[in-house]
Amino acid sequence: MSGWDHRHVIDLSAFSTDDFTTVLELAQRFRNLPVTGTRKLPALQGRLMTTLFFEASTRTRSSFELAARRLSADVQSFAPGSSSLVKGESLLDTARTYVAMGANLLVVRHGCAGVPQILAEALDRSGDRVAVLNAGDGLHSHPSQGLLDLFTLARHFSPDAPSPEALRGRRVVIVGDVLHSRVARSNLWALTACGAEVVLCGPPTLLPDQFADFVAAPPPGQAVDPVPHRGPVRLVRSLEEALPGADAVMTLRLQKERMHQHLLTTLESYHRCYGLTHDRLALCGRPVPVLHPGPVNRGVELAGALLDDPACSLVEEQVRNCIPVRMALLYLLAAADG
Ligand code: ASP
């Protein structure tokens, strides 16, 4: 746990290479624990984790809850539709209500970028000892997803000792709706910190040119970049150009709920140009793993046959890794709080 000094986890732009190493090492230890027939680890006994999700979730919320339970924490979930939000209670007052009930860890998902950060700052100002974990805020950031994607890739390249080094010099293609993807943004910070080369691929409407400079130092809100030398980012418009020489391909969901203009002609034409199939993947020139954060639009971002092919799809492995990575984050935040 050398040097871990985060009281909240909001964005991976604040992570140093040591922070990534710490999370991956701890996640590997948790991942190696037998899942069935074991007693829970006592690390978070007496702590309360509350999930405040203002947006839909399948994987993130349930894996945070399972991770907390495996560490013996109590778990409480907030359901916006049946809460006093509908009577006009503010978001901050809602969060404070859960803190007053004893929440030590608040896992927050919201459709607006910046909400977890605002909550963390307000709770810090009022002296509340509670850690805020961003579980996805608008287009901005999804740090635990970036970490579990990194862990999945690091384990693929170095199964016994996953570390940032396992990614150094690897070429990772991220294809699709980068513009609306908080997952892509978190992966950009994580992968470049580990020295990977990131190739972004998509049409101009979903991947504006400015993304080539996304990780230009220093990160927003910070005086210096905690990572002195990041891997390069390149932007290309076709998979035919992106795939040759790739070491891994990360596909992204088309975030239709965040598209307020007509940015696509048809899903069929998107699939024809940017959908990943076995044939397209062969352009990499060697067997290469495929990732997707889920939920998948089958036959749009990824052909169903590729998604279901265990020889190349790491999608289920990403889901398995949700739990040990989120255990690692909860453990580190609880330990930082004493
Ligand atoms: N589940 C991820 C997120 O919440 C990816 C997605 O929804 O496309 O950002």
Image (cartoon, helix red, strand yellow):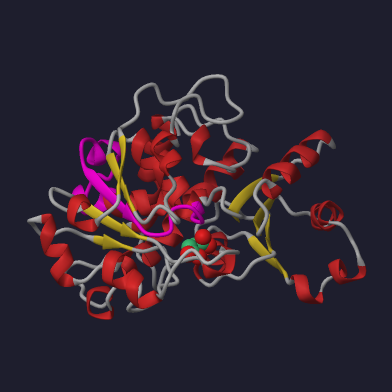
Magenta stretch, residue numbers: 154-182
**Quadrant showing the N terminus:** top left
Left or right: 189 as drawn, with respect to 305: right
- Residue 79 lies left or right of residue 193; in this view the side is right
Residue 281 shows in this picture: yes
The percent position of residue 198, horizontal first and vertical second, equals 30, 42
Q: Is residue 149 depicted above or below 269 in this figure?
A: above
* The magenta stretch spans residue 164: yes
Of residues 94 and 204, which is closer to you in this image? 204
In the image, residue 190 above or below residue 222? below
In the image, is 172 to the left or to the right of 123?
left
The answer to which image quadrant residue 268 occupies is bottom left
Quadrant assignment, res 163 = top left
Residue 40 visible: no
Q: Is residue 326 magenta?
A: no
* Residue at figure coordinates x 39%, y 68% from the top left: 35
- Looking at the rendered image, the quarter that the C terminus falls into is top right
Residue 6 percent coordinates (x, y) = 58, 34
- Residue 12 is situated, as x and y percent measured from the top left of the image, at 49, 40
Q: Residue at x 52, y 33 (%)?
A: 14
- Residue furthest toward the left? 285
108 left or right of 88 in image: left
- Nearest the eye: 251 or 260: 260
